[in-house]
Amino acid sequence: ATFYFVGPPLPPGSAIGNVVSLDGRNGTLLRERIATHLGVSIRLTHRKMCDLKPTWPALFPELARLHEWVGFSDLDVVYGDLDGEIARLQEGDELLVPAGMYPQPLANGNLMLFRSTHKLLHAWERIPGRQ
């Protein structure tokens, strides 16, 4: 698994595995990306960044294209064997969420992985009143 973090770069020596830090401190660049890929203009705050979690893969399509599965999680999630969990999924499965989140509520922001397909990368567009 490859993990991407939006935020300040991780301190040297703290990254383990495949970790890429996307410097999220430049609000202008993030606002431009949001306008380009989401078609909205917003004021960025810590809470707004959290609200945007479901859109992160759509905000970074160049990264989503590299992976069959993408998603988002809180920083304090203990992932366990994600590769093993994904390997057990069936061909038609589209989502991977913690067992306690299925079937309702489907997600609460702690962890959600989904197939990197247009349908799922842009599922957030079907939320009524999303703006």
Image: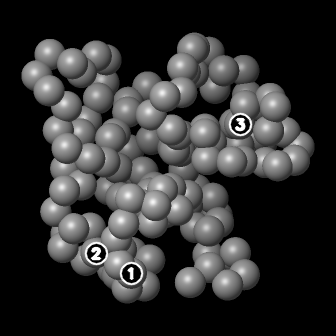
Residue density around tag 2, few if under 14, some if 14–19, many if 20 or more, within 10 Å: some
The image's colouring method is one colour
Q: Residues within 10 Å of mark 1 (few under 14, many from 20)?
A: few
Residue behind mark 1:
42
Residue under numbered circle 2: 31
Pick the front one: 102 or 25: 25
Q: Kindly identify the amino acid type of the residue bearing the numbered disc 3.
A: Val
- Could you tell which of marks 1 and 2 lies nearer the N-terminus? 2
The residue positioned 36% from the left and 66% from the top of the image is 45
Chain-order first, disc 2 or disc 3: 2
Q: How far apart are marks 1 and 2 (CA)?
A: 7 Å
Alpha carbon separation for disc pair 2 and 3:
29 Å
Is residue 94 shown above or below 39?
above
Which amino acid type is shown beneath numbered disc 2? Arg
Q: Quadrant of residue 111?
A: top right
Q: Which residue is drawn at 53% across and 45% down?
A: 71
Instruction: Examine the rendering and report whether any part of residue 114 can be seen.
Output: no
